[in-house]
Amino acid sequence: MLATDSDPIVAIATAPGRGGIGVVRVSFGRAGEAAARALMQALCGQPLAPRHASYVPFLDQSGNALDRGIALYFPAPHSYTGEHVLELQGHGGPIVMQLLLQRCIDAGRAFALRLAEPGEFTRRAFLNDKLDLAQAEAVADLIEASTEAAARSAGRSLEGAFSRDIHTLVEDVITLRMLVEATLDFPEEEIDFLEAADARGKLAHIRERLAQVLADARQGALLREGLSVVLAGQPNVGKSSLLNALAGAELAIVTPIAGTTRDKVSQTIQIEGIPLHVIDTAGLRETEDEVEKIGIARTWNEIERADVVLHLLDARVGSTGEDHAIAARFPAGVPVVRVLNKTDLTGLATSVARLGGESDADVSEVRLSAKKGEGIDLLRAQLLRIAGWQAGAESVYLARERHLIALRAAQDHLALAADHANQNAQALDLFAEELRLAQEQLNSITGEFTSDDLLGVIFSRFCIGK
């Protein structure tokens, strides 16, 4: 938890290191306008016009200029945090920034100005209703975005697209709750509530809309987190060659000598904007080499954590008894793509096929040549299919695992509500309770129903100064 949410706080708001510009940000909290004016006078030697860029010297305690730059003053509530905010934009050298930061702290001792903790400025924005919780999280996601698609989706969340969809769902649930509660309050009114108010139709509409929001959020979470893809198989089947082909660079050493790869080699690549964390591992075989044994043990550890396993086989010999034994150890429920590599040595064409039925595990097969780069696009398409990615989805917004958990929980409560709606009038109180629980789950996404402990965890992962 942060110290006190109304303390005056200050921090360097730009990344560590050297840059053309560095920013020191102050949010004055309960100290208010008087403190802001006092600090402006101490550091800039003059009052500043609100929301007007002023080129001024930044003064030390003796009145000498530490630096010269742009000063901006944002009176409450028209600022990022909703409080009085002062931003000093100077030259981005680390020593200059530290001197300016220390000067702010020294000049602000009279009103107990302190260093901000990670995420504290954005937490203030949330607490002062400048952002809801989903938008606040999107600030960090935008900063950390590893792909263009992730950045665009985080921007949509920051603009409120995700929050608007959640608020629409909440309003629909509240409307339905009002009808149910009214019927519970006036049982003497002999009307068929479910028929007259079309409660089933309203509930079905809410569930359909929630399913769409969940689908968009899943894709957003995929953009944020990516997939962990592990290359597994016997030695010399071309795992390192496939990593190089997927990455488009010579990342792993490729030789005809079995056991060349003894430790994992990781690389993050993009397919349609989705980050794929591809991990090349040691070949799986019986060995007396102690170093290779350690590499094989690490391979199985990576396989246990994988989102997708690419099981590489030599297309010239197909699946051997050793390959069957390897496949039998793969974790249940993890999608597997059997990659028959080295088709260039067999004369067979590249191809793709689904091996698992609807009720079976997701197992597919791709024939390709990693060395020649033939069939790599087929493999990329299979990875996108497994990820559930839909190209050109404009409604995607970046989402986190906690959002998916809340949406799934709301979905479960609405399913139970639908069950109760199909029962007799005595089930109306259970219907109403499931609607209330669904609303709580949806509200937790935007922060209208969120514990302080959760807030502490979320904002502690932000960078300082944001």
Image: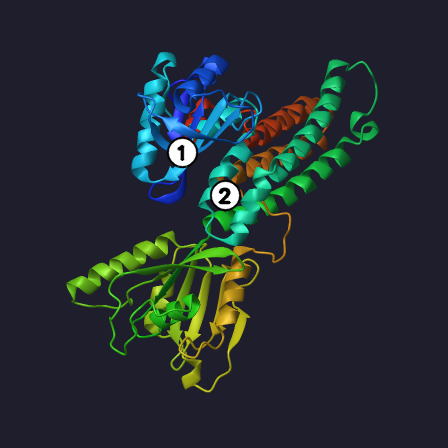
Query: Which residue in the structure is indicated by mark 2?
Result: 142
What's the distance in space between the residues labelled 2 and 1, CA to CA? 30 Å
Q: Is residue 450 visible?
A: no
> Residue type at mark 2?
Leu
Q: Nearer the viewer, residue 259 or 353?
A: 259
- Which quarter of the picture shows residue 443? top right
Q: How is the image coloured?
A: rainbow
Query: Would you call the spot at circle 1 few (<14 residues within 10 Å), some (14-19), or many (20 or more)?
Result: some
Q: Would residue 432 be seen by someone viewing this image from the given angle?
A: yes
In the rendering, at what x and y percent does residue 271 appear?
A: 50, 61
Look at 56% across and 46% down and name the residue there. Answer: 153
x and y percentages locating residue 213 in the rendered image:
63, 42
Query: Disc 1 on helix, strand or loop?
Result: strand
Q: Is residue 433 left or right of residue 66?
A: right
Whichever of labels 2 and 1 marks the residue nearer the N terminus, that label is: 1
Q: Which mark is residue 68?
A: 1
Q: Considering depth in this image, is 293 or 251 the residue closer to the camera?
A: 251
Residue situated in front as seen by the camera: 127 or 306: 127
Locate the N terminus and report the quarter of the image it occupies: top left
**Residue under the point 65% across and 31% down:** 167
Name above or below for residue 202 compared with residue 187: below
Q: How many marks?
A: 2
Q: Position of residue 249 (x, y in %)?
A: 38, 69
